[in-house]
Amino acid sequence: MNKKYIPFILIGALLVLPQLGLSSYVLHILILALMWATAGMAWNLLGGYCGQVSFGHAAFFGMGAYCAGLLAHHYDITPWLGFLVSVPVVAALALVMGFIVLRLRGPYFVLATLAIGELLRIIAENLVDLTQGNLGVLIRRTWVDKDPYYYVILALALGTYFLIQRIMASRWGYYFVAIREDQDAAESLGINTTLYKTIALAISAVITGFTGAFYMNYMGYIDPQIVFSLGDISIVMIMVVMVGGVATPLGPWVGAVIMVILAEWIRSLPVIGTGYQTLFGILLIVIIIFLPNGLVGDLPKIKRFFKKEVPA
Amino acid sequence: MLEIKNINVFYGDLQVLWDVSFQVEPGEIVALIGANGAGKSTTLRTISGLLRPKSGEVTLDGQPLHSLEPYDLITLGIAHVPEARRLFVEMTVEENLDMGSLRGPAKLKRKETKEMVFSLFPRLSERRRQQSGTLSGGEQQMLAIGRGLMGLPKVIMFDEPSLGLAPILVGEIFEIIKRIREEGKTVLIVEQNVRQTLAIADRAYVLETGKVTMAGKGRDMLNDEHVKAAYLGV
């Protein structure tokens, strides 16, 4: 079979999936996986391709979620408009954040992004008049059925995939990779590294904001602890990419499916289920040691491993 | 042409260059020699704009460079071939060369310049689609030099081009640097391989603990008692 048909078959399969009479729970898992794949691709653009590892992407996720939620809560406007409103808001946040953190490198950058993510959570908790603080925001969901949400997030995921593929095939893509591999060399060769890092951050942030806005629409309830969470948002985004494969186009998809299923499964186990974050931590360590390029990036290594197992 | 006047450079509070001054005239090969930590790489990084002098100035044909952004310097005709090559290892040979000609007139002449680089380094031509991280050390150094040439510089600066190379390759790299000068480029080179550097350099400056302590013709320095004792081990 011709290899070039595979993407069309995959997309076709994704389109008909909800029509196969899946249970509402399975559909929920699929929606979450697509949402995390999108968030992972967004993180991958900045962290994977451009090499700027952010521990604070919950800032953008939460901001997108609150854009959608507060519109509905305060003005009774459809929360879907949050997608549109989140673009300037999240982009502005990314520019401010970029101005502060993009002059830092390595661990300093990581710590600064982490701090900003946490800072936004604390702000959201305390601006009670605007956000209702820890009470959270509850909205009426548009649809009872899950199918429409599935198609919204599928469109977002596919759109993100093709956008990032386009970017990485362009001049910008080369600049991002050059910055990751050697910032000084890139600068000496004429690349305004601060500018291009800001571009990568802004695109990554806006897409992450979209996933947040989707989360609000889909779940119907958010609070600062959920959407600005370090452990449940920022770090899960990183894990999705690390497990799947850093700087690979399909890595976030694979990582998202595995992480969502794993999270559901571990959480359902008696006793140890409550410690799922510990187990995620252990998993991350194992991945970093044995598959530093993730499942997609280290595919040849995995194949070789299994070939050795088969007796000749 | 390239003039460095009384620059003082700090890493935080630590001063590493003290009133360093020297100049490079068109068509010259000028060498900066000195021990590890003498400030040679720091000097090149300051000229490239990656570090800012606290005082003093760097000018090219009278135009001050120290107030410009590093990413604009390449359009003025300065190329920096950094220490340890610093290629984009996940890009191919050809992509690395393209990254050397992103701006200005060099971008328009990319194709011709690339042919020139391939004729200078036929081995790179054979491997143009190979990932640069998989090249041998000597080939990587050639690629780093080629990438520098892609920017069509007037002045090309080499930071330790012989680092980590087998002796036979070291000789080859020095031959290439001579050829680059014959093609009309001005060369500033920083090296620990003092003997071979002085043999090709028109003039040289000795840098010791951040200060210029000697200046002279390359040939004369080879016979200088202090240089012999300190750097040539005779």
Image (spheres, helix red, strand yellow):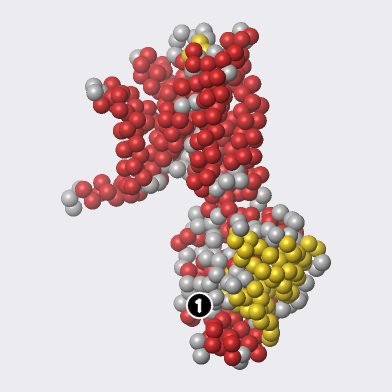
**Where does residue A268 sit, x and y in percent of width and height?**
28, 21
| Label 1 crowd (10 A; few <14 / some 14-19 / many >=20) | some
In this image, B174 relative to A36: left or right? right
**Where does residue A309 sit, x and y in percent of width and height?**
21, 48
Outermost residue toward the right? B62
Image quadrant occupied by the N terminus of chain A: top left
B218, A172: nearer the viewer: B218
Residue at 52% of width from left, 45% of height from top? A108
Residue at 51% of width from left, 48% of height from top? A106
B153, B55: nearer the viewer: B55
**Where does residue A248 sit, x and y in percent of width and height?**
46, 42
Residue at 48% of width from left, 80% of height from top? B167
In this image, B223 relative to B27: left or right? left
Mark 1 belongs to which subunit? B
Residue at 57% of width from left, 50% of height from top? A179
Residue B190, placed above or below residue A272: below
Residue B126, placed above or below residue B218: above
